[in-house]
Image (cartoon, rainbow, N blue to C red):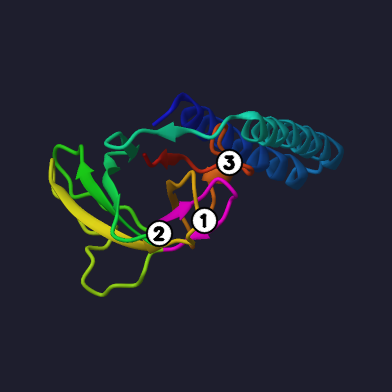
Amino acid sequence: MTPFDVVFILLFLTAVAVLVSALVTALRGHRAAALRRLRTLALATLAYMAIVAVTSLLAPRAEFAVGERQCSDDWCIAVSDAGPLSDTTIRVTFQLSSRARRVTQRERFVVAYLRDSAGHRYDPDPAPDQQPFDVPLGPGESVGTERVFRVSRNAHGLGVVVTREGDVPFPRCCIIGTGIFHKDAIVALP
């Protein structure tokens, strides 16, 4: 958990308290005071979301090296190896691991794809025998999996992007550093 996660949690709880306070104030017949509280909350929320948007726009894309772990809580993934199988086929090996000491970990909605320097996206070939990224991992457990990608012949500057797709973006969309315009991290391939 980052300091920005803690800031978001505190601000979220404060917003809930202000909403409850405004509701109680309105029920007591002080509608003008309740509206002032709601207006202040709306302005504070807009200011916070502007900070989230600006920092996510200005923040550079995070870059990881082959072998370097990207972690979400205690669940981690790393590109452990990558190499060509042919002119247009690349195999990428991933290492999934858990830093947890007592509980089983899994991360849902994780996808990986290749991106070239021109911004083209290359999704992995479907293969039913691949270990899924959301496999449950016991405390300290680690497993490997691989994906095969077909790229165009003129693709260069390839990198592996590991991200989430298909889940509910809240609260990640509202946390400084992972906000609305967040750029997914990339692992540059040699």
Camera-side mark, 1 or 3: 1
Q: Residue furthest top?
A: 3
Which quadrant would the C terminus be assigned to in this image?
top left
SS class of the residue under badge 3? loop
Camera-side mark, 2 or 1: 1
Residue at image location 57% in from the left, 30% down from the top: 60
| Residue 182 numbered mark, or none | 3
- Residue at the spot of label 1: 154
**Residue 181 location in percent, x, y?**
63, 42
Query: Could you tell me how far apart the alpha carbons at marks 3 and 2 are, in whole angstroms?
Result: 17 Å
Highlighted magenta segment, given as a residue range: 111-123
**Residue 133 location in percent, x, y?**
29, 57
In the rendered image, residue 25 lying in the magenta stretch gets the answer: no
Residue at image location 49% in from the left, 48% down from the top: 156
Amino acid identity at mark 3 = His
In this view, the residue in front, 179 or 9, is: 179
Identify the image quadrant of residue 100. top left
- In the rendered structure, the answer to whether residue 13 lies left or right of residue 95 reads right
**Residue 73 location in percent, x, y?**
33, 39
Query: Could you tell me how far apart the alpha carbons at marks 2 and 1 are, in whole angstroms?
Result: 30 Å
SS class of the residue under badge 1? loop
In this view, the residue in front, 25 or 182, is: 182
Instruction: Give the mark nearer the N terminus: 1 vs 3.
Output: 1
